Image (tube, rainbow, N blue to C red):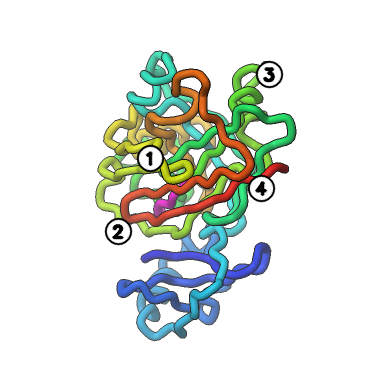
Amino acid sequence: MKLLRVGTAGAERPALLDAEGTLRDLSGVVADIDGALLADEEALARVRAAAGELPVLDATGLRIGPPLARIGKIVCIGLNYHDHARETGAEPPAEPVVFMKAPDTVVGPNDTVLVPRGSLKTDWEVELAVVIGRTARYLESAREALAHVAGYAVAHDVSEREFQIERGGTWDKGKNCETFNPLGPWLVTADEVPDPQDLSLKLWVNGELKQDGTTAEQIFSVGEVVRYLSRFMTLYPGDVINTGTPAGVALGAPEPKPFLRAGDVVELEIEGLGRQRQEFKDA
């Protein structure tokens, strides 16, 4: 299934995109799309059974919000693509590099993204987001870990590189600025993504292709990332994991590096998971 939330910010309602591409209203079946729904197999079965009978929504002018409400935490993996590590001159890590983003960085896939005040190095990163559907702790294998995944989505891990790298401390300062995690348009359930290591990722800036990668380049697979994280923290339904970005970011480009400015337009997509478009404006 392709689950999404539509409407004005803070007042989104649940919806479903059916197999024919028709947008349908889910609000008569479930209250929202969140961790509680993803953990409830009976509720998900009701959604599947009702899909063809749901009221049709007119998508004209309808805002698409983040596909997941009440996100518990966003755990991110850095330097998780071989080609991205090469372009930045970094050694591939022996273990996953972990940092966090606050859930309040999440906005809709086509919402405005704000360039922070004083920023000179705002950067782009298309990423595969993993949404947890079952509580995960101390998992033993990558295969077991994949059984705890509810679905997948497109994430834009917007980053401010000076704040992240040059200002001391952890990466968090460059990752948690307002609007720095557009998510969606859809939450695609795991049954529609048979192999998360076989997805293409693309990103364009002002129409120019900048990132053109594949999840096959991941250093740590989706299953291994979920297994690894479950050894250090409990993952709950509705938690999100951003799994890293392929080569092609501004940080890895020759000087002068083409960091983002107000007025730039970024578009990104992942095979089967949908497309985003954001205009950047000054905060």
The crowd level at tag 1 (other Cα within 10 Å; few <14, some 14-19, many 20+) is some
Residue depth check, mark 1 versus mark 4: number of the one nearer the observer: 1
Q: Label 4 is placed on what type of residue?
A: Asp
Task: Name the residue tied to disc 1.
Answer: 209
Q: CA distance from mark 4 to mark 3?
A: 22 Å
Residue depth check, mark 2 versus mark 1: number of the one nearer the observer: 1
What residue is rendered at 30% in x and 58% in y? 191
Q: CA distance from mark 2 to mark 3?
A: 41 Å
Residue 180 in magenta stretch: no
Residue 167 got which mark?
A: 3
Tell whether 115 sits left or right of 185: right
Q: Label 3 is placed on what type of residue?
A: Arg
Q: Label 2 is placed on what type of residue?
A: Glu
Task: Name the residue tied to disc 4.
Answer: 104
Dot placed on the residue nearer the N-terminal end, 2 or 4: 4
Indicate the secondary structure of the residue bearing disc 3.
loop
The range drawn in magenta is 150-155
Residue depth check, mark 1 versus mark 3: number of the one nearer the observer: 1
Dot placed on the residue nearer the N-terminal end, 1 or 4: 4
Quick one: quadrant of the C terminus? Answer: top right
- Nearer to the camera, 27 or 280: 280
Q: CA distance from mark 2 to mark 1?
A: 27 Å
Residue 151 in magenta stretch: yes
Residue 135 in percent (x, y) is at: 48, 48
Dot placed on the residue nearer the N-terminal end, 1 or 3: 3
Q: CA distance from mark 1 to mark 4?
A: 29 Å
